[in-house]
Amino acid sequence: MEIRQLRYFMAVADELHFGRAAQRLHMSQPPLSVQVSRLEREIGVALFERSTRRVTLTPAGVHLKDRARRILDEVDSVRGEMRDFVDGLAGQLTAGFVSSANYTVLPEVVQLFRARRERVSLTLVPLTSGEQFDRLRDGTLDVGIVRDEIPTGPSSAALTTEVVYEERLVMCLPVAHPLAARAEIVPEEILDVAMITYPRSLMPGFVGRVDQMLGFSAGSMRVVEEVAHQETALGFVAAGVGGCILPESVRQLVPPSIAVVPIAGSPTTRLLAARRSNDEGNASSAAFIECLRDAAAALRAPLSA
């Protein structure tokens, strides 16, 4: 028994007329009669009483009509669900994000995505940029929000990135530090500050951005602690251990014990969307990145107004 045969049967059962059923199915009557007769032979029972004047359902036909309608409704439902999966309207999406995205794009991204893709289950995983690239490569992450990170090396072609948001780098200092009251600090002065920095292995992009800002003097920075998360770095700053360099959006997070000082030249840091190159047909990932673009545009709007 085939789904196609059930559809043929249902058309005749609804119309009780082979000619009208054939018109409804956009086919000629003889092939329709052949298919219905074949179905009757396959299941071993007559489904219709036929005469020159009318067509009626047998008791077996009445029973099959009820069962076939439920079967075909379920088939249509499954087909619709699968179309929704392909179109990114249903399913699951796992997204990674750097902690600093929490204070810029992420809240709006989540709100937009859940409004636009109500039936997609969104799982958010806080990870460093390097960890996100590893998980994108092994398929346990669908999309990522990384900081200043561009994939490199032999496997770089497997990943694509897109800049979605750019903001200034700032210096975070204990309020009692001599430089804390300055209107801005020049990069060379950073070399005299005890610094909390980040592991290059996990954040090569961001660390490279800081190195670029400091130029040839980057290797002379006085590192007293190395941490993986900006919240930890701020904790050390608040305790008076030293200073750290972070994105300007950190202003939303710092306590009164920390001063945020602009850096001369307004060096910037960037958030990027990342995903697998061969996953560009993933409609859910594409929808998430579109929400990311819209959230970033909303953040930039007040700055350009």
Image (tube, helix red, strand yellow):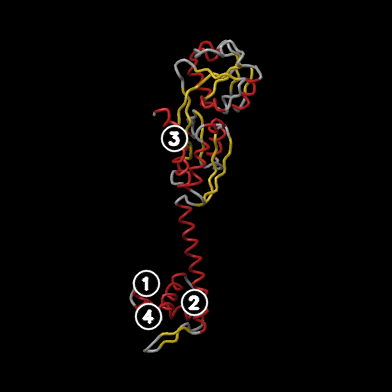
Calculate the distance from the C-alpha at mark 2 to the C-alpha at mark 4: 16 Å
Q: Is residue 5 above or below residue 275?
A: below
Calculate the distance from the C-alpha at mark 2 to the C-alpha at mark 3: 55 Å
Q: Pick the residue in front: 250 or 271.
A: 250
Q: Pick the residue in front: 134 or 48.
A: 48
Amino acid type assigned to the residue bearing label 2 in the image: Lys
Name the secondary structure under disc 1: helix
Amino acid type assigned to the residue bearing label 4 in the image: Phe
Figure quadrant of residue 222: top right
Give the residue at mark 4.
18
Calculate the distance from the C-alpha at mark 1 to the C-alpha at mark 2: 17 Å
The extreme bottom residue here reads 52
Give the residue at mark 2.
65
The residue at the point 44 percent across, 72 percent down is 7
Name the secondary structure under disc 3: helix
Q: Residues within 10 Å of mark 3 (few under 14, many from 20)?
A: few
Residue 13 image point, x, y percent: 44, 78
Q: Nearer the viewer, mark 3 or mark 1?
A: 3
Residue 140 image point, x, y percent: 56, 42
Name the secondary structure under disc 2: helix
N-terminal of the pair, mark 1 or mark 4, is 4
Give the residue at mark 3.
298
Residue 50 image point, x, y percent: 41, 87
Calculate the distance from the C-alpha at mark 4 to the C-alpha at mark 3: 60 Å
Q: Are marks 2 and 3 in contact (CB under 8 Å)?
A: no
Q: Is residue 255 above or below residue 6?
A: above
Amino acid type assigned to the residue bearing label 1 in the image: Leu
Give the residue at mark 1.
25
N-terminal of the pair, mark 3 or mark 1, is 1
Q: Quick check: can you spot residue 279? A: no
Name the secondary structure under disc 4: helix
Q: Is residue 72 above or below residue 56?
A: above
